[in-house]
Image (spheres, rainbow, N blue to C red):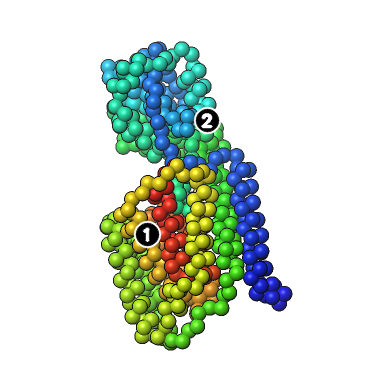
Amino acid sequence: MMLKTLLSNPVSRTFLALLFAVTAVLGAFLTYVTSPESFGEPNIQLQSDTIYYLADSWSLAYDYLEFKFSPGTLVVPGYHHGQVVAVLLIPPEAHPGELALNLPEEYRGDLPEKVEDNLDQALIMLDYHDYNTILRDSGDTIILRAKGNEEAMPVRYLSHQMEQGRSLLVSYNLFGFNNWLLPTPQTVLLRLWGQGLGNFTYYEDSHVQIAGPAINLDFPHPELNTQFYPPKNYQARAVFYMIFLGLSAAGLIAFISGGLEKTGPDIKGEYHPLWTAAALFGAILYSWLLTGFQHHFQPPLLGVAALWLLPLLLVAAWARQARLDPRFFGLSTQGLRAGIIAALSVSVFIALGSTFTFPAGIDWNTSLVLGLGTAAVLREALLRGFCQRILSHWLHPLAGIATVSCAWALIVVITRGSGVAALPLLSALGPSLLIGYLYYRTDNLWATGLLAALLELAPMILKY
């Protein structure tokens, strides 16, 4: 009773929301600063501005892989924020690199114990300190290449090869933003171009993986129990961080909308429960089919927006027959100002919290913003204005938020082929819950659509 009385006061609601938001922010901050490894980088661009060459033979041996390169081999470091995280080795055409794979008997199958091949190229992903140890400080092997040869190297080709290195790195989605995990000390991750084996990947950690067109092996390392890359507990840390970040954003919404009175819209019309339940199921099914269609066939974005508009026309006809006022769906100015402020604030907060840095600029694309933004607004009009509103009226507001948000998160994860795992599911569920919560707190569909559009567009137009 006392809690109900406390929450009925707008000032008390605002203060409690602020206290909740600050507590959640502290939880997210502590999760981030106490993590032993980085949460990743939102955008990794491997730049190559200096080219070296081997003045002498150079070799490197791992537990199951050895290779050797002759003098004259080009050494192209790939820099990210001034530190080397990749090295591309290109031997002379007349003297290709030498490769030897030593495979354990119990896992090699029909392959010989030792597989040898010549190498056209090798790309090594490594930590900056490992680069210093095995290459730069390995003696007088590498010297600066002449500027004329440096200019002769095709920049676009080097960028393409370095891009293949980025594809080797582990990444995960954090509320729409991809975060790439940089190599850690003792990382063994290579892309090799063999003349006989073709293009294949070599990964040596607690598991050894050799993947290519001519060879495909995966077996546990007998002597390594600790996983170096990616860090073994990075998924758990990312899950806790996303939970705290989402709670902080929800607290921000509650703080901004804390003074709004939640009286609920008057319902003067009547609708048939059975037909309405069928319409709810149809709306969710339509959302799933349309999202899958968009992901696989990638039609024009304005066409996707038009497809989201079709069921809304049916909802409008249903609402007219049921004599429901547009305010029932949130089509009003009530809560609009607080909703817009909350949508803008939460979008900025999520972008900063998901990337751990300020954006360097905006890659504006009018057709993308117009098409994707319109599609997001119309989608939320169907999911929140119809599905969540009806379920909240029938059951409970929190049940409406949870049901629709979980359904949409599952649709996103399934259609994108991410697998129903903790990280991708939580990454899709977080923004969905925030959008549903804003709709519940403000009863305004315009602000809800704005938040959905901003959260969807931010990872695509912000440059890092």
Place of residue 93 in the rendered image (x, y in percent of width and height, measured from the top left): 27, 19
Label 2, on which residue? 186
Q: What is the residue that sits farthest to the right in this orientation?
A: 2
| x and y percentages locating residue 85 in the rendered image | 46, 31
Residue 102 picture quarter = top left
Above or below, 42 against 288 in this view is: above
Q: Give the residue displayed 48% in from the left and 68% down from the top.
A: 336
Residue at x-position 48% and y-position 41%: 41
Q: Residue at image x 53%, y 36%?
A: 228
334 versus 340 height, above or below: below
Quarter holding the N terminus? bottom right
- Looking at the rendered structure, the secondary structure element under dot 1 is helix
Q: Secondary structure at mark 2?
A: loop
Residue 270 visible, this orientation:
yes
Q: Is residue 26 left or right of residue 450?
A: right
The percent position of residue 219, horizontal first and vertical second, equals 46, 38
Residue 128: image location, x then y, percent? 50, 28
Q: In which quadrant is the C terminus drawn? A: top left
Which mark, residue 455? none
Label 1 packing within 10 angstroms: few (<14), some (14-19), many (20+): many
Observer-nearest of 221 and 349? 349
- The amino acid on which the numbered mark 1 sits, given as a three-letter code, is Gly
Separation (CA) of disc 1 from disc 2: 44 Å
Report the residue marked by disc 1. 373
**As drawn, is 97 to the left or to the right of 18?**
left
In which quarter of the view is residue 292 placed? bottom left
Visible in this render: residue 109? no
Please tell me which residue lies in front, 427 or 188.
427
Kind of residue at disc 2: Gln
Q: Earlier in the sequence, mark 1 or mark 2?
A: 2
